[in-house]
Amino acid sequence: MITLGVCLALTSEAAPRKVLVVTTTTGFRHSSIPTAEQVIAELATKSKAFTVDYARVTPEDAQFKGSDGKPDKAKVDAAIKAVIGEKMSPAALKGYDAVIFANTTGDLPIPDPQAFLDWIKSGKGFVGMHSATDTLHGNPAFIDMIGGEFKTHGAQVSVDALNQDSQCPACQHLGGNWEVYDEIYQFKNYDRAKVHDLLSLDKHPNDKTPGHYPISWCKPYGKGRVFYTSLGHREDIWTPNTPPGFERKNSKEKAEAYQKHILSGIKWALGLEKWKLKGLE
């Protein structure tokens, strides 16, 4: 059990940090990915704390469609290999301060997975959102780095997330409990003693079985910093702007609160905020 500590924010006048946003998928592809890309770019611009580059392939683009009008798997796979190879090679990673996996899924063809993990350990940042834990299932070292592995989920549901560190900049605006509607993950290969929990549940989101069900956490990784939140399945958790035809379940205020949550997590991963993680330092 981790004793919760105080999180302190630091200010910096340095040049913006450089962040690679990866939204490439080889498994299930979330409809909220374009919204996630837009929101992260907006947070970068408004905060002036970082700039963004992307490693993305959108299978629906015309260039990847076959004669039947559907995405051609061979073309998509080739594009994914090319963009991941270009953006996530050991040489390319030297140009970034952090990587964000925003709703990634599947076995991404990272040229040198161990070099990627060593890059994080050297003092860089990793941020994972929602299905980042549904990525690279065959790589135990990646799962150890991120802190947990997607196991399953039930129907989307409204939950009262317990704020495990109300002093942390990522959570201090959320109150003691934070009601949110989303697809809530359950995990395997998660060890509570190895992470600093930020948001969690004390009962299963769907069947209400008592237990510890993490939602968001952070952890050191060597000299690096890892922030993860499983929220982010739905468009309306990402943005206060309602997509056309979308039935909103989260208020605009909830989306704004989520944006504060992830912005603080990005800043911490970049070393721009200092969080006290007792028992993990």
Image: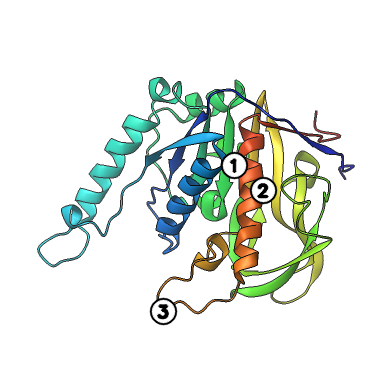
Quarter of the figure with the C terminus: top right
Q: Position of residue 87 (x, y in %)?
A: 36, 32
Residue located 60% across and 54% down the image? 259
Relative image position of residue 23 (x, y in whole percent): 42, 48
Using residue 99 as the reference point, say whether residue 59 is left or right of it. Answer: left
How many numbered badges does the structure rendering display? 3
The residue lying furthest to the left in this view is 67
- Please tell me which of labels 2 and 3 falls first in the chain: 2
Judged from the image, the secondary structure of the residue bearing numbered disc 3 is loop
Q: Is 126 displayed left or right of 217 in the figure? A: left
Q: Which residue is mark 3?
A: 245
Which residue, given by chain and number where applicable, does mark 2 sit on?
189
Residue 93: image x %, image y %? 44, 25
In the image, residue 38 sits, relative to residue 253, either above or below, namely above
Q: Residues within 10 Å of mark 1 (few under 14, many from 20)?
A: many
At a point 63% along the width and 57% down the height, the residue shown is 258
The numbered dot on residue 143 is 1
- Label located before the other in sequence (2 or 1): 1
Instruction: Check if mark 2's residue and mark 1's residue have beta carbons within 8 Å.
Output: yes
Pointer 1 or 3: first along the chain = 1
Rendered residue at 53%/68% (across/down): 236
